[in-house]
Amino acid sequence: MSATRISQLAERTGVPSATPSPSPGTTKEPTVLVARSVALFVVAALFEIGGAWLVWQGLREHRGWLWVGAGVIALGLYGVVATFQTDDDFGRILAAYGGVFVAGSIAWGVIADGYRPDRHDLIGAAVCLAGMAVIMYAPRGS
């Protein structure tokens, strides 16, 4: 539930809101909110892709259960980071994150495993990132 919705509910019920209302002139600019959102997507991708990679290394590359356990923890942290997005719609957040996951997975493969994407990989990742931007940041009516 967003801070605005909490404040509105508190006003209707007469219960003081635990979420302070922003002072005039202190609301965040849209570019700051987008930058924060993108940063959260990147952190989430590092946890999810890194966690999956650790599990892969532990099981497929026989590095052991310690690697698997670390991967499971990282995957859990990915879920926590996603909750910090300001949008209240879980489906929108997860759908948009999918674009970041695709591009991030290719980047992880390049860095961690020496994978060399071809032009189709890069075009596909760019399309996914464009889709993420439309899903998350396109202007919407209230």
Image (cartoon, rainbow, N blue to C red):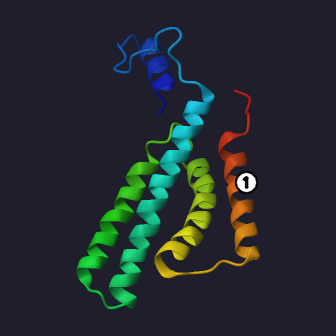
* Label 1 crowd (10 A; few <14 / some 14-19 / many >=20): some
Q: Residue at x 56, y 39 (%)?
A: 35
Q: Quadrant of residue 102?
A: bottom right
Give x and y (percent) for residue 13.
42, 14
Give x and y (percent) for residue 62.
32, 91
Give x and y (percent) for residue 113.
49, 81
Work out whether residue 98 can be spotted.
yes
Q: Is residue 93 above or below residue 138?
A: below
Q: Is residue 18 above or below residue 32?
A: above
Give x and y (percent) for residue 142.
69, 26
Query: Residue placed farthest to the left in the image?
Result: 66
Q: Is residue 14 above or below residue 66?
A: above
Question: With 43 as the anchor, is 105 left or right in this view?
Answer: right
Q: Residue at x 56, y 68 (%)?
A: 107
Disc 1 is placed on an element classified as helix
Q: Residue at x 54, y 23 (%)?
A: 28
Count of numbered marks: 1
Work out whether residue 87 can be spotted.
no
Q: Which residue is mark 1?
A: 130
Q: The disc labelled 1 sits on which kind of residue? A: Ala
Question: With 131 as the anchor, is 114 left or right in this view?
Answer: left
Q: Residue at x 46, y 55 (%)?
A: 44
14 vs 132, nearest the viewer? 132
